[in-house]
Image (cartoon, grey):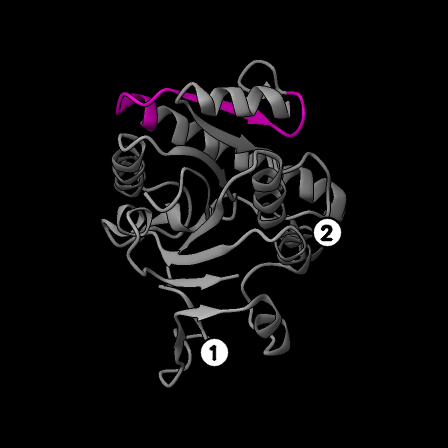
Amino acid sequence: MRYKRILLKLSGEALMGQQQYGIDSSRLQQYAEEIKRVKDMGVELAIVIGGGNIYRGVQAEKSGIDRVQGDYMGMLATVINAMALQSILEKNNIYTRLMSGFDIEKVCEPFIRRRAIRHLEKGRVVIFGAGIGSPYFTTDSTASLRAIEIEADIVLKGTRVDGVYTADPEKDPNAEKYHNITFSDVISKGLNVMDTTAFTLCQENNLPIRVFDMNVPGNLYNLIIGEEVGTLIE
């Protein structure tokens, strides 16, 4: 295996599948099967999932809701997604622990770094919900921070695009894909990979990021065994 311990970042929007909002059960099951395949190889796996399929904090100000209040609403949306993912993983016989950035003890454990690492060492998939528990930070920032805290080998950002391109490939048919790129080049070229806080955390802590298409069956497994899937940033 190329990686022993990974932090997988999933977007909430990806859970919609072909729907306009909410959770597509078939997409959720597909993700569970992909995760189980690499988990059965012995990979230690932590997951951060967004909440954009339910609510995004940045929508708050447009609808007249205070930004801080909106961010907390977005954090609760990530908990809903994390609970759904936990449920489907456990139906696929994968032991999990759900940890939250703020206290919701009825459904989540509080995030404690040493406890999270111990769960991973025991072979459990750890899902981090509610972001870092503070407004103004995205789930990308959560993924970077938690990956550093649990000493992950890499952040795997699973999206609906198969890597980093010179432009948005969904809008520009002439966009070219990078297979490998440095942190400095991403910044100088103004490429939209993660928000600035998240990206800077990875850069300063020498934590590589791989961007790949999570919706293609087998992609997660293939990159774990060493195939060149998506784009590697280091």
* Residue 12 point in image, percent of width and height: 46, 46
Q: Earlier in the sequence, mark 1 or mark 2?
A: 2
Mark 2: amino acid: Gly
User: Residue 97's spot in the image, x, y percent?
Assistant: 47, 21
Given residues 186 and 63, the one toward you in this image is 186
Within 10 Å of disc 2 (Cα), the crowding (few <14, some 14-19, many 20+) is few
Magenta stretch: includes residue 150: no
Label 1 to label 2: alpha-carbon separation: 32 Å
| Residue occupying the far bottom of the picture | 174
| Depth check, front residue: 120 or 1 | 1
Asked whether residue 110 appears in the rendered view, the answer is no
Where is residue 198? Give x, y as percent: 63, 53
The range drawn in magenta is 89-103
In screen coordinates, is 199 left or right of 232? right
**Disc ID at residue 61:** none
Q: Secondary structure at mark 2?
A: loop
Position above or below: 31 against 89: below
Residue under pointer 2: 64
Magenta span contains residue 97: yes
| SS class, disc 1 | loop
Residue at 39% x, 22% y: name it. Answer: 123
Q: Amino acid at mark 1?
A: Ala
- Which one is closest to the eye, mark 1 or mark 2? 1
Q: Is residue 60 left or right of residue 4?
A: right
Q: Would residue 48 be found to the left or right of residue 205 on screen? A: left
Q: Residue at x 52, y 20 (%)?
A: 118
Q: Which residue is mark 1?
A: 167
| Residue at image location 29% in from the left, 37% down from the top | 38
